[in-house]
Image (spheres, rainbow, N blue to C red):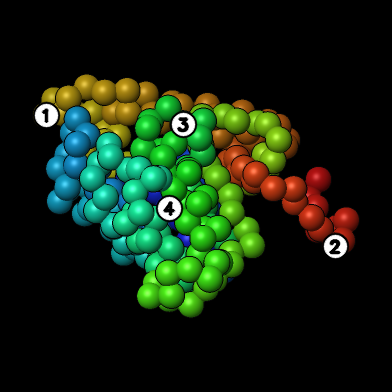
Amino acid sequence: MINILIFSPHPDDAEISIGGFILLHANEYKIKIINLSAGEHSSNGDKIERLKESKFVENRYKNISTKCLFFEDANIQHTVIDQQKRIIRIIREYTPGVILTSHYTDEHPDHFESYLLVKNATYKAGLNIYPELGEQHTCKYLFFYSQNLYNGKGSMFIDISSVIEEKLNILSKYRSQLIQDNSRVKTYSNTRIFQKVLAKDKYCGSLINTDYAEEIISYKKITIKNIFDIVF
């Protein structure tokens, strides 16, 4: 069983948006990061290099594991039945309590498609369909993350101040995408991503009176049984 199942369009997407969330929850829970594609069509790095980079968190942290589905980069499609079935099978196999994936506010088409793909597959995994894909599993909690700031209905903020340096260290291991040197094509990601991550996380932190925070988005209303479950 996996407690938290995270679907990432490409290697590094989840860590950029919710690397702190992953680190904090890995202290107590088993986390599986599913990279939908290997990001083989990116400006820098090939499939082998990107997959090797994605294994850093798995090798470093005992409660974090990773897997790649090898959907074609830049061709993730929520309407493709085979892609839907692959996601449904994984949800039924790992029976997670929480699922996260990218939010529709990200500009990259794969991120938008991942939002729809995982949202639909999460729902269908609980239906009496596709028995060949395993026993039905209804995941109660589906959340989203974005590389941009949403700060709208359903936004929650996680204090990551204690792990911000560790998050940045993880991002530095994605050298092919996020570190600029003379052998790489100059891109936004390898020249500006660290500034963006720090600026966004610091701003999110200011919203809850802490140094750094990450945003988690729910498309459903959150219910509680005890007012003291909320941290002010």
For discs 1 and 4, the disc positioned in front in the rendered view: 4
Residue 93: name its quadrant.
Answer: bottom left
Give the number of the mark in front: 1 or 2. Answer: 2
Q: Amino acid under label 1?
A: Ser
- Give whichever of discs 1 and 4 has the lower sequence position: 4
Residue 45, image x and y in percent?
Answer: 17, 39
Q: Is residue 133 left or right of residue 26?
A: left
Give the residue at the far front of this rendering.
Answer: 129
Quarter of the figure with residue 202: top right
Q: Which residue is mark 3?
A: 106
Q: Name the residue that disc number 1 marks.
A: 183
Residue topped by disc 4: 7
Name which residue lies at 48% across and 43% down. 115
Would residue 199 be found to the left or right of residue 72 on screen? right
Residue linked to disc 2: 225
Quick one: SS at disc 2? loop
